[in-house]
Image (cartoon, rainbow, N blue to C red):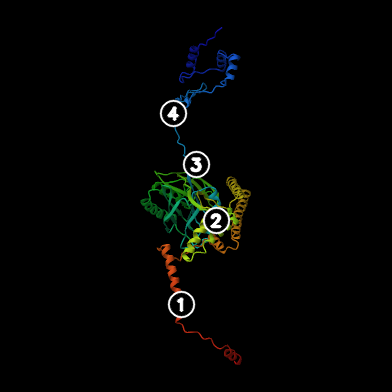
Amino acid sequence: MEVQCNTVNQYSVCRNIFPHTGIIRYSASQLYHYRSICKPRIRPPQAVIDILRDYGIYRSRGCRGQGARNRRTVKWRSLWDHNNGVHRELLRYFPTETRYDNNDHCSFGLINARSLRNKCEQFLHFVVTENLDFCIVVESWIKDSDTIEIASLKADGYNFVNVERKDRIGGGIGIFYKNNISVEVIDSGERSSFEFALFKIRIGTFVNDVAAIYRPPYSANHPITINTFLTEFSDYTSDLFLTSNRCMLLGDFNIRVNRVLEPGSEAFINLLNALSLNQLVSGPTHISGNTLDLILVRENSDFSVTNIRTDFSLSDHRFILATLSTSRPVLVRKQIQFRKLNSIDRERFRSDLSYEMDGMMALDSLDDLVTAYKIRTERVLNDHAPVISKVITVRQSVPWFDNEASRLKTKTRNAERRWLKHPTSENHDSFRSFRNEYKNHVEALKSTFIRRKIESCGNDTRQLFATVANITGSTKTNPLPEGVSDDQLAGDFATYFYNKVDVIRNELEHHPIFIPRDERTTFCFIFYH
């Protein structure tokens, strides 16, 4: 008996129940009923299956030719799809914040170090492991004479530029950056209420000015009111925006912008609004729970700063990490040349070199001997260890890092978050314990690395002096004159020493003959006296 369903009647029922949706709905019993009336799959006879298997065409291969990919896709609503009578015109659209992946976009940091001199190892480990492209440091407390500290911050693939405070101790602004970024100090100086340094940063074709600012708090040593700072800061930013089209200001302003009802904070926020500056940092940046370190960007700028968050506390301030809307700097690639000298067969090399040297003794001219020696030794060396050219990618790395340092850093950060969430004395002691352990570990790692590096020099004094100069940051002064070619310089040296020998010979020829005194007379005189 054939069974047919009255779809028209069901549709009319559904339309009466859901007149505003236009959607047909089926119950579970109806769907099971429809499945039972479908035609069953027909299985071919066994003889046909055997023939297909014998000819190797039993399995279907398909011949769509990527038709599904090229076919126009039409989206159909599911049987279970419904909107429950929601009026979509009443919905509001909330734009979400665009977040950039740190692996693709430039990331930077800001920290008030409060003396980077005794935190170089911790600072270096955090910035490198977080893969920051550059980091602004205020209150570095580093002078130009601190060559050892500056040299320790210039790790493999990184550089550090510092602007010291001239008139008194403390202060100082620095920037730590990768070598594939171009950084130039455009301007630096001090006003009565703050110090500043303006850096021009080039990341590929992206050029941005970064103004780092540090405002000391009001104290007996620095009795400058916030009103004076507001006036000088307004003048500074007005002059800055006249010369810089793309600029970002950041630093430690020592103004609690989270307390908007305080007179100083309210006046500063009103000034930022008047200057069309957006303050992007939210949340505490100091252990006291206040927001003191800020990132300021002009409205309608053609770049954006996103993914702003606070992290590890290097001092009483926390790191501020953010992402800049430009691609990361491209890794530098360079070509190197080397020889595999360790793979030389010494006996065979000695035999070939002796064979080449035998034919040189017949030459009479010194110039011919030098030329033949150079050509023949170079030929033997190229046969045994030819020059190999290779293009390598220069990657930033610090050789004395290990996994234990990263593990201790993670423990320190977790302990700090636990203390900030539950500010008890026990959590604070735990945080300080992990932080001291982390600091001692990275310092011990660096000391061990430097000791092994010096020990590896052995009796090679030249390598030892070069290693010590690299560690201490000693710069080599070039005593040679500038603007002279190497060939001319070598000729001048040869002429000078050749003439010097001639002068000595001429003076010896005209010098009177030396007649020694009688030794017996001298001896008798001494004995008599």
Q: CA distance from mark 4 to mark 1?
A: 107 Å
Q: Are marks 3 and 4 in contact (CB under 8 Å)?
A: no
Mark closest to the chain's N terminus, 3 or 4: 4
Q: Nearer the viewer, mark 4 or mark 2?
A: 2
Determine which residue is flagged by label 1.
Answer: 505
Q: Are marks 2 and 1 in contact (CB under 8 Å)?
A: no
Mark closest to the chain's N terminus, 2 or 1: 2
Residue type, numbered disc 1: Arg
Q: Is residue 377 above or below residue 72?
A: below
Residue type, numbered disc 4: Leu
Determine which residue is flagged by label 3.
Answer: 101
**Of all residues shown, which one is farthest toward the front?**
362
Determine which residue is flagged by label 4.
Answer: 90
Q: CA distance from mark 2 to mark 1?
A: 59 Å
Q: Quadrant of the C terminus?
A: bottom right
* In the foreground, 509 or 36: 509
Residue type, numbered disc 2: Cys
The image position of residue 212, as x and y in percent, is 45, 53
Res 524 quadrant in image: bottom right
Looking at the rendered structure, the secondary structure element under dot 4 is helix
Q: CA distance from mark 4 to mark 2?
A: 57 Å
Q: CA distance from mark 3 to mark 2?
A: 28 Å
Q: Are marks 3 and 2 in contact (CB under 8 Å)?
A: no
* In the foreground, 445 or 32: 445
Determine which residue is flagged by label 2.
Answer: 120
